[in-house]
Image (cartoon, rainbow, N blue to C red):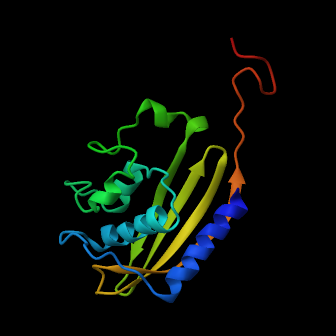
Amino acid sequence: MYQVLTRALLAAAAATVLAASTLPAQAASATPQVAALNTVMDFRLNWVGDSTKFDACSVYRSVRRPASFPEGLLPAFRVALDRTGQPCVENASAADPRNTVRVRVDSVSVGETAATVNLTVRKGELTYVEEYHLVSTTGGTSWGLNDVKVHRATRTYFVRPGMGPGRPRP
C-alpha cells in the first residue's frame, strides 16, 4: 500500500513540478498560511484523489486560529475537514485510535517566496509524513506546488485490553 501511494504521489508531484499550478479563486481575506494550505488540499483532493479528512483542529492551529474559521479555506476544501464549527472539540468517533483515518497538519511555514507544509497522514495502523514545498506566484497570496516528499511509513499495532502481555484487565 505504501509503495502504491508513494508512486501515485510522486507521479502527480512530477507533473506539477514541471508547471506549478495555482488556484484561481483564492479568497481575498486568505492569509498566506491559508493560501498555502488551500494549494496542498487541492493537490491531495484533485490530483492524488485522496479524500482522507483533515483534522480540523490541526488546520485551525496551523493557520493561526482565526475567529472566522474555516472562512479562509475555499468552499470546495471545507468538506475535507473532519468537523466544522468548533474545530478543537474532540468527537467520540475520532477519539478511537484504532479507527483513526485522517490528515494532521503539523506545520505551515511561509516566507516571501517559498512555503513548506508538513502533514502526518494516518490510515488505521499506517502512518507517514508528507512534506510539500511551494513557490509563491503572487507575493504570498497564491502558491504553486514545487515538490512533494513522502517519508517512510511506520506501522502501529493496537492491543485490545486483556489480550496483551500480563494479566487480563477486569
Occupied quadrant, residue 100:
top right
Q: Where, quadrant-wise, is the C terminus in this rendering?
A: top right
**Which one is in front, 23 or 73?**
23
**Residue at 31 percent of width and 79 percent of height:** 142
Q: Is residue 100 left or right of residue 141?
A: right
Q: Is 8 drawn above or below residue 160 in the view shown?
A: below
Pinpoint residue 166: horizontal percent, then vertical percent: 81, 23
Q: Visible in this render: residue 148?
A: no
Question: In the rendering, at what x and y percent does residue 152 appear?
Answer: 69, 64
In this picture, is 117 found above or below 124? below
Q: Residue 77, position in %: x, y?
A: 34, 58
Out of 89 and 153, give the one closest to the viewer. 153
Is 14 on the left or on the right of 37, as rendered? right
Question: Taking 107 as reference, is 167 left or right?
Answer: right
- Residue farthest along the top direction in this orientation: 170
Give the residue at x 51% y 61%.
Answer: 49
Name the residue furthest right: 165
Q: Quadrant of residue 107?
A: bottom left
> Nearest the camera: 62 or 12?
12
In the rendered image, the quadrant that contains the N terminus is bottom right
Q: Residue at x 35, y 67 (%)?
A: 38
- The x, y position of residue 89, in whole percent, is 35, 38
Q: Is residue 77 visible?
A: yes
**Image-quadrant location for residue 41:** bottom left
**126 relative position to 45: left or right:** right
Residue at screen point 74% across, 20% down: 162
Q: How many marks?
A: 0
